[in-house]
Amino acid sequence: MTELISTDITDPTQGVAHLIEALREDLGKDAEHSRTLPPQTYYSPAFFALEQAKVFRADWMCIGHVAQLANVGDYFSINILGEPLLAVRSAEGIAVMSRVCLHRWMPIVEGAGNARGFACPFHHWSYGLDGQMLGAPSMEQAAGFDAKALRLPRVRSEVVSGLIFITFSDAVASIGDRLHDLVPLLGKYHLADLGVAFTLDYDCDFNWKIAAETFMECYHHSAVHRGTLEHSFPGRLSSIGEGGEGWSICQQPLRAKGELSEILTPGLVPFEGLSEADMRRINLVQIFPNCLLGLDPDRVSVTTLLPISAELTVWHRVVLVSPAAMAQPDFADTCARMQARGKTIAGEDVAVNGIQQRALHSAYAGPGRLSHLERTVWQQANYLRSRLLD
Ligand code: FES
Ligand SMILES: [Fe+2]
């Protein structure tokens, strides 16, 4: 018999109360009975507004890695939740601040690079690396104006194992404390001491949760990556651990008879001190909500998801390698090869995810049951429940 389908929660003009109730229905279910969130949570503007308020603005978000700011004067700019921000290393260390000019709101800098200071491109008000205003031309007739008293507003930030996190919340507890149990694993990969091999960016036409879910499960290898990953990393061999407070982990092992050459990249240098088992697997880690780590035996990828709207996400990846690998004479060729392969695999995911996003608008789409190979999808949903349900 055909089940009648209720479409009463597909109206985008509705509020989120019905979606919150749908989330509550699965509260406390065990993993064996797990299913996805309702598809409406992936496109409802009202639900996205709720996520912004209770997840992204209230929790910590990763914006990059300290290797992007190796030297004094190094900076990079990002846009996150509509805020133009600047991460910069001054003589005092790394700071994250607003890059909206204190005059008439022009962003004082775009992109990334190395600078001794910043001059706003609109009227040349100038700022030091620490955000201190240094000068403002032709302001001597502005009564009481004192450039020395002005400074770009700082955003609360913390560095954990080389990862740079920010939060807009004064109340949220330290991310360092929360990741206490994860730090030893990141230490095995020397995460704080790696250098940038290359970066990869995508403007994704899908919800941020889709991107995170796809990164964190290997169930799709046999279909989506059948020509790239599945042979060496069969999805059915992957396993998902308990994770910790605020993070999840999926292990992606090399096939039993696989050679190390299938997991190692020619030209890179494996990290020192890894066990035999570590040499034969890739750890995929999500630090909720927006940070995705790929821990390979010779490189680490840090992917940050920057949600723009319910159906648009900027996906920014930094691939990090050991200083020993960077010193190899053919390092540029190695990076080019890694980048090409990274683009192929990410392209396979991004193509599917865009189609998936459009299809989940269907009136016939509902929560789908999850395999044990997708526990990370369930864990992310439970993280959201913990933030969204009172
Ligand atoms: S807006 Fe920056 S100097 Fe005028
Ligand atoms: Fe994938």
Image: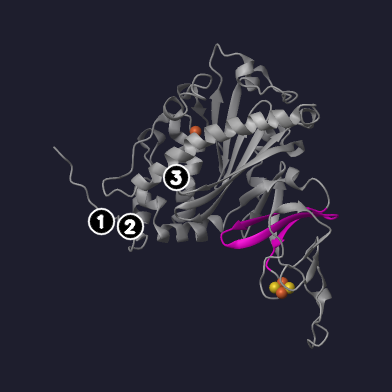
State the separation of the CA atoms marked 1 and 2.
9 Å
Name which residue lies at 71% across and 65% down.
108
Name which residue lies at 77% across and 69% down.
151
Tell me the residue that label 1 is attached to.
8
Query: Above or below — where is 266 with respect to 387?
Result: above
State the separation of the CA atoms marked 3 and 1.
22 Å
Observer able to see residue 75: no
Q: Is residue 85 magenta?
A: yes
**Comparing labels 3 and 1, the label whose residue is closer to the camera:** 1
Query: Above or below — where is 218 with respect to 6?
Result: above
The kind of residue on which mark 3 rests is: Ala
Give the position of the C terminus as an image quadrant: bottom left
Tell me the residue that label 2 is attached to.
18
Disc 1 on helix, strand or loop? loop
Q: Position of residue 291 (x, y in %)?
A: 59, 44
State the separation of the CA atoms marked 2 and 3.
16 Å
For the record, the magenta segment spans 73-100
Q: Position of residue 383 (x, y in %)?
A: 49, 46
Query: Above or below — where is 330 with respect to 386?
Result: above
The kind of residue on which mark 1 rests is: Asp
Camera-nearest residue between 207 and 166 = 207
What type of secondary structure mainly makes up the magenta span? strand
Camera-nearest residue between 274 and 73 = 73
Tell me the residue that label 3 is attached to.
381
Query: Disc 1 beta carbon < 8 A from ligand 2?
Result: no
Q: Residues within 10 Å of mark 1 (few under 14, many from 20)?
A: few
Observer able to see residue 63: yes
Callouts 1 and 2 close, C-beta under 8 Å: yes
- In the rendered image, which quarter is residue 34 located in? top left
